[in-house]
Image (spheres, rainbow, N blue to C red):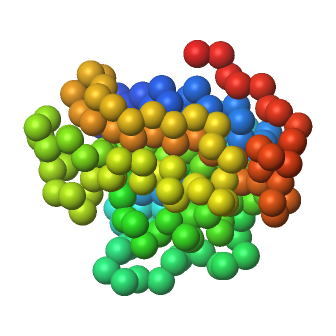
Amino acid sequence: MGESHPHAVLQAASAWVGRFAPLVPAGGPVLDLACGSGRHLRLFHRLGHPVLGIDIDLRGVADLTGTPGVELLAADLEQGNPWPLPPDRRFAGIVVANYLHRPLFPRLLDALAPGGVLLYETFAMGNARFGKPSSPGFLLRQGELLEVARGRLQVVAYEHGEVASPRAAVVQRLAAVADLAPGQGLDGDPEPRPLPAR
């Protein structure tokens, strides 16, 4: 076991991810992309999911090395590098927080299993007045996550606006479910899932 990362205990899971975590099918594998200190990796592991954390730097989750049900993969997801997973690997849940690399959007959608849940939360246009990130390349455009989901995912919840905690920022958030069958979205009258209580 590695040393515990000092931020691992300090960073709480995103309230957005925590709110919609119960939508992820029980016991299904969860991918935490750009996992950082592993706050969402740890949350889903505690909830009984096998988890995979991918990051260019795994020092923040070194204490989880060798933990049953936890897989860690060091990978540079940018610089034109290939997707580090087999094309047929699917997840019941995919979490992305405070990370944006637009070329990965199609890969994330393809990696969702039928009925799988995408939980995405990152900075959006307007954040520059609060500090970094401030470059448009790292900020979602108005409605961009909705566009990513259009035609592929059933949107459960979406928000775009200012938050005060954990620090002042402009964020965009999406919780969306991969259709159980092609063409069976809201208009296909699927069995509704109960929303987690706020």
**Measured from the top left, where is residue 34 in percent x and y?**
42, 57
Which is nearer the eye, 162 or 50?
Answer: 162
Is residue 72 shown above or below 41?
Answer: below
Among all residues in the image, which is located at the extreme top?
A: 198
Q: Residue at x 77, y 25 (%)?
A: 194
Among all residues in the image, which is located at the extreme front?
A: 187
**Measured from the top left, where is residue 84 in percent x and y?**
53, 76
Q: Residue at x 60, y 49 (%)?
A: 118
Is residue 86 shown above or below 102?
Answer: below
Which is nearer the eye, 30 or 115?
Answer: 115
Which is nearer the eye, 159 or 45?
Answer: 159
Q: Quadrant of the C terminus?
A: top right
**Measured from the top left, where is residue 161 in percent x and y?**
33, 32
Q: Is residue 130 left or right of residue 73?
A: left
Q: Is residue 124 visible?
A: yes
**Measured from the top left, where is residue 4 in percent x and y?**
38, 41
* Res. 173 image quadrant: top left
Q: Residue at x 35, y 47 (%)?
A: 142
The number of numbered discs placed on residues in the rendered structure image is 0
Is residue 57 shown above or below 164?
Answer: below
Q: Residue at x 56, y 29 (%)?
A: 18
Q: Is residue 60 visible?
A: no
